[in-house]
C-alpha cells in the first residue's frame, strides 16, 4: 500500500523536504552566530534576521502542506503522521529561533566552548534530519533512514552530556550569578533544538515501521 500510494502524492514529500531544508539553513546560521560571538567575525544581527527569515519561510510551507492535507482524499502515509512531522519540523525551527533571539534578549556578547559544541551538534542533527526526510519516500533507503534517526538520538544524548558539563562549569568557575543564570537558560534553549530533532526522528521511525 505504501509503495502504491506514494507516487500519487509526491507533493507531500516535496513540501516536507523543503521544510527540512529550511531547518538545515536555520541551524547553519545559528552555528555561525554562536561561533562568531565575541570575535567580530560575523554580522550577528544579520544572522538573527536570517534565522527568522527561514522560520517565516518554513511557516508558509507548513501552511501549504496543511492545506494540501485538508484537500486530499488520499495521502501517501497516515495523514496524522504527516501533520505531526510537519509540526515537529516547525518546532525545530522555532527552537533555533529561540536560541538566536536569546543572544540579544540576554545580551550575550561572548560564546563558550560548550555553546559552540552544542550549536555544532544541533547543526549535525538537523543535517541528518534533512537527509532522513528526503529519503523517507524511498522504500529501498529504509535502513539508511533508520540509521539516520538513531544517529540523531545519539547526538541528542551527547548534547545532554555537554549541557550538564556546561552547567557544572558555570557554577564552579567563579563567574557572576547573572552570567551563570543567562548561560544556563541559553544552554537549555540549545538543548531544546536537539530534543525537537529527536521528536521528529522518532516520528519518521514510526512512519517507517507502520509502512514497512
Image (tube, rainbow, N blue to C red):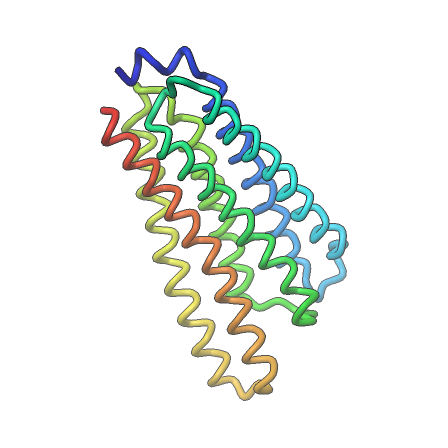
Residue found 65% across the figure and 71% down from its top: 106
Is 116 situated above or below 52?
below
Choose between 7 and 180: the one closer to the eye.
7
Q: Taking 162 as reference, is 101 left or right?
A: right
Quadrant the N terminus occupies: top left
Residue found 36% across the figure and 20% down from its top: 76
Quadrant the C terminus occupies: top left
Residue 179 position in % (x across, y down):
60, 80
Choose between 68 and 140: the one closer to the eye.
68
Residue 6 found in image quarter: top left
Residue 147 position in % (x across, y down):
31, 36
Residue found 45% across the figure and 17% down from its top: 10
Residue 42 position in % (x across, y down):
74, 54
Q: Taking 87 as reference, is 26 left or right?
A: right
Residue found 70% across the figure and 70% down from its top: 109
Is 150 situated above or below 107?
above
Choose between 39 and 90: the one closer to the eye.
90
Residue 169 position in % (x across, y down):
47, 78
Q: Taking 205 as reference, is 53 left or right?
A: right
Is 22 situated above or below 136?
below
Q: Report the label total.
A: 0
Amino acid at each position: 500500500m505504501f509503495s502504491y500510494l506514494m507516487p500519487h502524492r509526491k507533493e507531500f514529500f516535496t513540501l516536507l523536504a523543503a521544510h527540512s531544508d529550511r531547518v538545515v539553513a536555520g541551524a547553519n546560521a545559528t552555528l555561525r552566530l554562536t561561533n562568531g560571538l565575541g570575535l567580530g567575525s560575523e554580522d550577528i544581527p544579520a544572522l538573527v534576521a536570517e534565522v527568522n527569515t527561514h522560520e517565516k519561510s518554513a511557516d508558509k510551507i507548513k501552511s501549504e502542506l496543511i492545506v494540501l492535507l485538508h484537500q486530499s482524499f488520499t495521502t501517501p502515509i497516515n495523514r496524522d503522521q504527516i501533520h505531526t512531522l510537519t509540526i515537529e519540523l516547525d518546532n525545530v525551527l522555532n527552537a533555533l529561533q529561540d536560541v538566536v533571539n536569546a543572544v540579544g534578549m540576554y545580551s550575550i556578547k561572548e560564546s563558550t566552548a560548550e555553546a559552540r559544541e552544542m550549536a555544532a551538534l544541533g547543526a549535525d542533527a538537523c543535517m541528518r534530519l534533512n537527509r532522513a526526510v528526503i529519503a523517507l519516500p524511498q522504500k529501498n533507503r529504509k535502513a539508511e533512514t533508520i540509521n539516520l534517526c538513531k544517529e540523531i538520538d545519539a547526538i541528542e544524548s551527547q548534547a545532554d552530556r555537554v549541557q550538564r558539563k556546561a552547567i557544572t562549569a558555570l557554577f564552579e568557575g567563579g563567574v557572576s550569578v547573572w552570567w551563570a543564570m543567562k548561560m544556563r537558560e541559553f544552554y537549555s534553549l540549545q538543548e531544546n533544538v536537539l530534543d525537537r530533532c529527536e521528536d521528529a526522528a522518532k516520528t519518521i521511525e514510526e512512519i517507517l515501521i507502520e509502512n514497512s
